[in-house]
Image: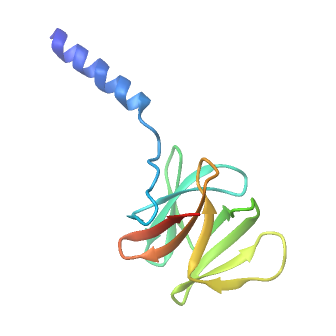
Amino acid sequence: MRAHILAAAVLATLALAAPAQAQPQSGQTVGEIPYTTCDGSRWSVSWQGDNFYHRPETGAGHADDHMDYRTWGGACWSAKWVDGQFFHTPKVGDYGHPDTILNFTDWDGVPWTATRAPGGWKVTRK
């Protein structure tokens, strides 16, 4: 009985000490990426068909046709997946552009570039 209680306590301690989101390695293909939203919230995003599947740091996720995110310089942009590429639009401004890459910041403010890849995202650290 004591061994079971001790094992449960050790597992609970390890779970609390574990990071909420593992840092991807540059050049790696990952299923989801951690990103910072325009209001500074910490979310992760994966693919659900041609839609983004957003998951907050805690709580339930949702699918959407766009992703609002912070770029390397801290500006707020929105991206959609259109005809096999991203279409980026600034949240302040009236112009947009297509591209095959998504430049975003992770939960720690680290700049990354992501491309869509089989199985998720291919990420490269700036």
Query: Residue 85's spot in the image, x, y percent?
Result: 55, 84
Residue name at image x 73 percent, y 52 percent? 39
Image: 3 above or below 66: above
Asked which colour scheme the image uses, the reply is rainbow
Is any part of residue 23 visible from this angle? yes
Q: Quadrant of residue 69?
A: bottom right
Residue name at image x 40 percent, y 64 percent? 28
Query: Residue 117's spot in the image, x, y percent?
Result: 41, 76
Residue name at image x 48 percent, y 78 percent? 50
Q: Left of 11 or right of it: where is 66?
A: right
Q: Count the marks: how many?
A: 0
Q: Residue furthest right?
A: 93
Is any part of residue 66 visible from this angle? no
Q: Left of 10 or right of it: where is 73?
A: right
Image: 16 above or below 4: below
In-front residue for pair 24/56: 24
Query: Residue 2's spot in the image, x, y percent?
Result: 18, 9
Q: Residue furthest top?
A: 2
Image: 19 above or below 39: above
In-front residue for pair 23/65: 23
Query: Residue 125's spot in the image, x, y percent?
Result: 54, 62
Q: Residue furthest bottom?
A: 83
Q: Quadrant of residue 73?
A: bottom right
**The C terminus is located in which quarter?**
bottom right
Image: 84 above or below 41: below
Residue name at image x 15 percent, y 11 percent? 1
